[in-house]
Image: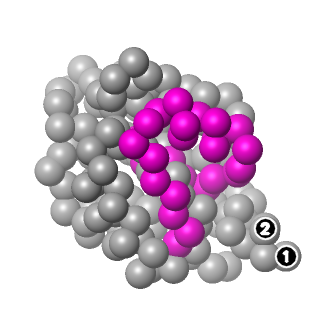
């Protein structure tokens, strides 16, 4: 099985999405980034993603709401929550509501890579990632 995944990144700080996209595309992933959570929600409705990486604190729609919509559409999507306001309470809330992992900002790109690798390994126990399904 290929490790390539369809990844959606939602962060209201454009630089975060840009850096993650460039880094993850080097690993062969197909990545889309959004700074507006509402636009990301529309894209989630239109396309299947394997992994959602979302900031928690963003304007009117927060990352917890984006995660809820993503999980409502697909129980197999792995959600990685990122935030600059990391607290134990916020981490616990994210994980109880279905997040695969929770990573505090500033993070190292290799930390994101390790988390995605774990998510891919969990797919191996289930179905193939959307990137591979689309290629079939």
> Is 106 left or right of 136, judged from the image as shown?
left
Query: Is there a contact, CB below 8 Å, between mark 1 and mark 2?
Result: yes
Q: Which residue is mark 2?
A: 133
Determine whether the residue tagged by mark 1 lies in a helix, strand or loop. loop
Determine whether the residue tagged by mark 2 lies in a helix, strand or loop. helix
Instruction: Please tell me which residue is depicted at 47% across the width and 33% down the height of the picture.
Output: 37
- Residue 101: quadrant of the picture: top left
Magenta highlight range? 29-54
Q: Which residue is mark 1?
A: 136
Q: Identify whether 98 is placed above or below 102.
A: above
Say which mark, if any, is on residue 70: none
Say if the magenta span includes residue 31.
Answer: yes
* Residue 19: image location, x then y, percent: 29, 64
Q: Identify whether 41 is placed above or below 124.
A: above
The local crowd at label 2, few if under 14, some if 14 to 19, many if 20 or more residues have their Cα within 10 Å, is few
> Is 39 left or right of 10, judged from the image as shown?
right
- Residue 45: quadrant of the picture: top right
State the colouring used for the structure image: one colour
- Residue 50: quadrant of the picture: bottom right
- What distance separates the C-alpha of mark 1 from that of mark 2? 5 Å
* Residue 123: image location, x then y, percent: 63, 60
Q: Identify whether 32 is placed above or below 110.
A: above
Instruction: Please tell me which residue is depicted at 41% across the width and 81% down the height of the picture.
Output: 26
* Residue 89: image location, x then y, percent: 24, 20
Q: In the rendered image, is residue 118 in sight?
A: no
């Amino acid at each position: 099985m290929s490790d390539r995944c369809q990844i959606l990144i939602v962060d209201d700080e454009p630089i975060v999405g840009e850096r993650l996209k460039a880094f993850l595309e080097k690993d062969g992933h197909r990545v889309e980034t959004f700074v507006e959570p509402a636009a990301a929600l529309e894209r989630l409705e239109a396309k299947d993603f394997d992994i959602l990486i979302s900031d928690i604190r963003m304007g009117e729609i927060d990352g917890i709401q984006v995660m809820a919509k993503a999980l409502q559409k697909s129980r197999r999507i792995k959600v990685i929550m990122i935030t600059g306001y990391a607290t134990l309470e916020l981490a616990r809330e994210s994980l109880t509501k279905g997040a695969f992992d929770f990573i505090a900002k500033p993070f190292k790109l290799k930390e994101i890579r390790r988390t995605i690798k774990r998510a891919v390994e969990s797919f191996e126990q289930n179905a193939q990632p959307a990137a591979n399904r689309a290629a079939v």
